[in-house]
Amino acid sequence: MKVAFCSSEVFPYAKTGGLGDVSAALPEDLAKAGVEVKVFMPFHKGIEPQEMHDGFGITKQGSIEVFFIKNDQYFLRDSIYVGEDGNDYPDSLERFSFYSKEVLKVLKKVNFCPDVIHSNDWQTALVNVYLKTLYKDDTFFKNTKCLLTIHNFAYQGLSVKEKFPLLGISDKFFDKEYFEFRGKVNLLKGGIVFSDIVTTVSPTYAKQIQTPEFGCGLERTLRKKGKNLIGILNAIDYTIWNPATDDFIYKKYSPDTLESKAINKTNLQRQLGLGEDKDTLFIGMVSRLAEQKGIDILSQAIDKIVSKCQLVILGVGEPRYHRILEEKAAKFKDSFSLALKFDEALAHKIYAGVDVFLLPSRFEPCGLSQMISYKYATLPLANHTGGLVDTVVDVSDGGGGFLFNNYNSSDLLSAVEEAQEVFSNKSKWQAILEKVTKFNFSWEVAAAKYIEVYKQLMN
Ligand code: ADP
């Protein structure tokens, strides 16, 4: 079975969030299961491929080849999606239309005829569209099917309608049944319509997006996919996320040496200038600072949270959230540490050093941090939505985390209080930690599910 996997970000070459993690781990586990995989991403700034060819670079990673589609005007930029104003680049459509056409050209050039093209999110959705339009009658691709995985419906790749002709497909597709969305061009919508199967990253989110509350205007288009809309839970890569082998953390530990987690806690407290105190509940968050992530309800609750607990937030995102959090950090220097940056090393130290990891998301397609947290004997505290429903069960129901059911600051605070109470009971806390470190959210399981879907497509 041959699969071309298309993504705008693949760790370690580029990552802004979960998509980068998924696009690195899933191809690897597909390859382990015997699938022949080639990965295609844009040649972003800083990437140094092992080989250069005309128009693309290649790096071999075991049996996988990662192709970097080159266009310096489009991809040699400091940030991969947004300009300095915090908005998507105004030429997003041109950038990813170029990328998508190139992927299909390169597939032919290197004579790799995929059984399935697996695209991800709006950036690479056009690969599927071009397969079914420009390449509809091309014998090379006559048996190629396509799948689109959507990691987040809040990002749809919108452009003004004047740009539609730049896509290079028939004008008839600027229509409500295809690309048109409230007078604009919607790349994700076009991708959904043209893909043979659409998947999203958790079973609960797959249901939620068919409703107006979570569908972001695409609920009708999605409902039309019927059984060709599937939820497959994401997973995490335990070769990267494992405190027993993690070189970023202060002291390695495993389920048998959980007492060493405390060393990570005190070292992190010291590094961040917080009081070194093992009995204070230490709460952490590592997140894109986007509307989805619950910063508004968190900021309303922060004063109360930091009066009893310590808090560290690592994140970058919208300037308005930077400002809100900076104000709070200045006010609560002793108990709240804020790092407004992307920092892989600090992220690992936080997963290892804190007691509780916050995910107060308004909506969450899957969320990876809760799964990472379990491995580091850190308990997630989350809103009951999307993939968090599929992965977090409240301690009071025999699970290993804390859930709140309504998206507001007082419910969030009650969950923090619940966590504090359980934390004060050392033996109970210890027993929960021992349980969660045994949870298994490995890619092997998820990859097997994708392979099932590929097979379904090929028949
Ligand atoms: P999303 O894809 O919506 O950003 P996920 O929970 O799926 O959310 O994935 C987030 C991933 O990105 C996790 O690996 C998290 O640790 C990482 N991450 C987010 N922000 C930062 C940051 N500022 N520094 C380092 N890692 C980050």
Image: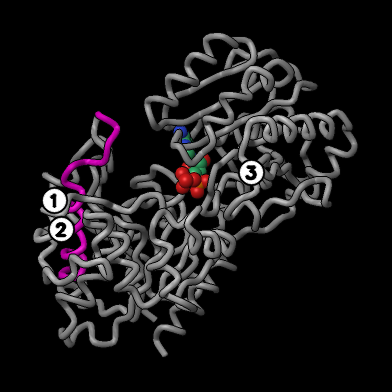
The Cα atoms of the two marked residues, 2 and 1, are separated by 9 Å
Q: Amino acid at mark 3?
A: Asn
Mark 3 to mark 1 CA distance (whole Å): 41 Å
Q: Is residue 93 found inside the magenta-colored segment of the image?
A: yes
For ligand 1, tell me if the residue under mark 1 lies within 8 Å. no
Q: Is residue 141 visible?
A: yes
Question: Which callout, 3 or 2, points at the residue further toward the start of the chain?
Answer: 2
Q: Position of residue 359 (x, y in %)?
A: 60, 40
- What main secondary structure does the magenta stretch of the protein show? helix
Instruction: Give the mark nearest the N terminus, 2 or 1.
Output: 1
104, above or below 15, in the image: below
Asked whether 172 or 393 is in front, the reply is: 172
Task: Describe the colour scheme in one phrase.
Answer: one colour
Q: What residue does disc 2 label? A: 98
The total number of labels drawn is 3
**Residue 63 in view here:** no
Q: Work out whether 65 lies above or below 13.
A: below
Mark 3, secondary structure of its residue: strand
Q: Which residues are magenta?
A: 85-106
Q: Quadrant of residue 423?
A: top right
Q: Amino acid at mark 2?
A: Phe
Q: Dot 2: within a 10 Å radius of its alpha carbon, few (fewer than 14), some, or many (20 or more) residues?
A: many
Asked which secondary structure carries label 1, the reply is loop
CA gap, disc 3 and disc 2: 39 Å
Q: Are marks 2 and 1 in contact (CB under 8 Å)?
A: yes
> Residue at the spot x=75%, y=17% of the render?
277
Residue 221 position by quadrant: bottom left
Q: Position of residue 347 (x, y in %)?
A: 53, 34
* Point 16% across, 85% down: residue: 137
Q: Earlier in the sequence, mark 3 or mark 1?
A: 1
